[in-house]
Image (spheres, rainbow, N blue to C red):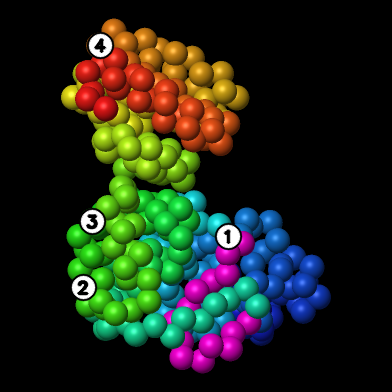
Amino acid sequence: MEPFIGSAAVRRGEFTRRGLARECRAIYRDVYLRRDVELTARLRARAAWLSTGAPLCGLSAAAVLGAKWIDPRAPAEVLRSDRHVQQGMIARSYQVADDELCLAGSLLVTTPARTAFDIGRGRHPDEAIPIVDALLAATGIGVADIAAIADRYPGHPGVARLRCTLPLCDGGAESPQESRLRLILLRGGLPRPETQIAFPQLRIRVDLGWRQWRVAIEYDGVQHWSDARQRAWDIERIALLEAAGWVVVRISAAMLARLEAVVARVRSRLRASGCPI
């Protein structure tokens, strides 16, 4: 179920005014969503478009383009010169070229590269990188595509920060926590790990690792401990990797709060495997 214009639904006889208030909730003025439908970032973006008719940008464009992990509570972002908008919405008066807009379904949004450009220059790297990672994964663009947009706007606010952020981005991350783990390792002075290393003969892959030294990093989210089938498969996967001569370092969500311990653990495994660090 998608957001809809409430007054139009009443005119069509789909709801009475009382029924509309009872069965649906207002996302923006006269834009409703049924109460039994979970509000996602994509649905919030569509509701903002219905309310304003303005192109979507930033987090809203990212959500519509398929990026995961966007917080549905974050304000929708629209492109318009009038900065006065409803609560739960942000108007951006960016300078955007015609070829930096595209259609995603029926919605006009900034292109993937332009969207990543705006997110990367407008947010702290720790916040921006997981979102850009997700956008890279969803759309197939590369860091070079984002850099090409940055070349168009060398003096714009945040571009210098964006250029420092881009080398840290990687579309192979499958969750924000994997992105965060990669950043911890890089900032700890370790070699850049490869993401999503595949082992076709074993029919498995690992989150991060270094083929040269046969060291793999696995991030264990909640499901790795709460799901018995997942836990059993994790044990089997690690046994297969170790039999193939790999060292597997498992990192839990709780460990991410101890940055130095994470880096020290991985560094010791790399050194033992011959990495000159």
Rounded to the nearest whole Å, what is the CA distance between mark 1 and mark 2?
31 Å
Residues tagged 1 and 4 counted as in contact (Cβ below 8 A): no
Mark in the foreground, 3 or 2: 2
Read off the magenta span: 73-86
Residues tagged 4 and 3 counted as in contact (Cβ below 8 A): no
- Furthest residue to the front? 277
Classify the position of the N terminus by image quarter: bottom right
Which label belongs to residue 28? none
Residue 85 placement, left or right of 118 = right
Mark in the foreground, 1 or 4: 4
Write down the residue under mark 4: 245
Tell me which amino acid carries mark 2: Asp
Considering the numbered disc 2 on the image, is that residue within a helix, a strand or a loop?
helix
Vertical side of 132 occupied by 18: above or below: below
Residue 75 percent location from the top left of the image? 57, 69
Residue 185 percent location from the top left of the image? 37, 36
